[in-house]
Image (tube, rainbow, N blue to C red):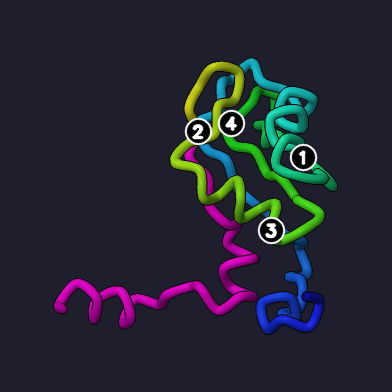
Amino acid sequence: LALLEENLQPKPSCGWEVVAAGLPLHMNEEDLYRAFSKYGRVQHVKVTRDANGLSKGVGLIVMAHRQSAETALNMPEVDICGIGVKLQWSTMVKDEMGLMKNRDQEKGEEED
């Protein structure tokens, strides 16, 4: 099992980081941790805040294992404090996994 090709891909330097946008502004790190721990072991969570300490409505979640992150990502929405939130890989993970598209690639898809 450990030698399957999908398990041999190196872990991105930022970890298996997922971005959750549209979070309730009253949400804190404990709420975010609790919401994602049902998908697997959470290594770190952070609610992004402005200079005044107010939430920007975006959370960063680093899961311990790729499979746990993908389980959450495959959900249509994740319920966080009663709000359905959509997820995506962080930009760093997309870049390191070769999932980022440049403008030329995006234009090619639009023309197809």
Q: CA distance from mark 4 to mark 3?
A: 28 Å
Q: Amino acid at mark 4?
A: Lys
Where residue 60 appears, as percent x and y from the top left, is: 68, 44
User: Which label lies toward us, 2 or 1?
Assistant: 2
Q: Is residue 111 magenta?
A: yes
Choose the circle earlier in sequence order: 1 or 3: 1
User: Which label lies toward us, 1 or 4?
Assistant: 1
Q: CA distance from mark 1 to mark 3?
A: 17 Å
Q: Which residue is mark 2?
A: 85
Q: Which residue is mark 1?
A: 45
Quick one: label 1, few (<14), some, or many (20+) residues within 10 Å?
A: many
Residue at image x 40%, y 77%? 102
Marks 4,2: beta carbons within 8 A: no
User: Which label lies toward us, 4 or 2?
Assistant: 2
Choose the circle earlier in sequence order: 4 or 3: 4
Where residue 39 appears, as percent x and y from the top left, is: 70, 42
Q: Which residue is mark 3?
A: 67
Q: Which residue is mark 4?
A: 56
Residue at image x 73%, y 75%? 7
Judging from the image, what secondary structure is the residue with disc 3 in? helix
Q: CA distance from mark 1 to mark 4?
A: 14 Å
Q: Is residue 28 magenta?
A: no
User: Which label lies toward us, 4 or 3?
Assistant: 3
Q: CA distance from mark 2 to mark 1?
A: 15 Å
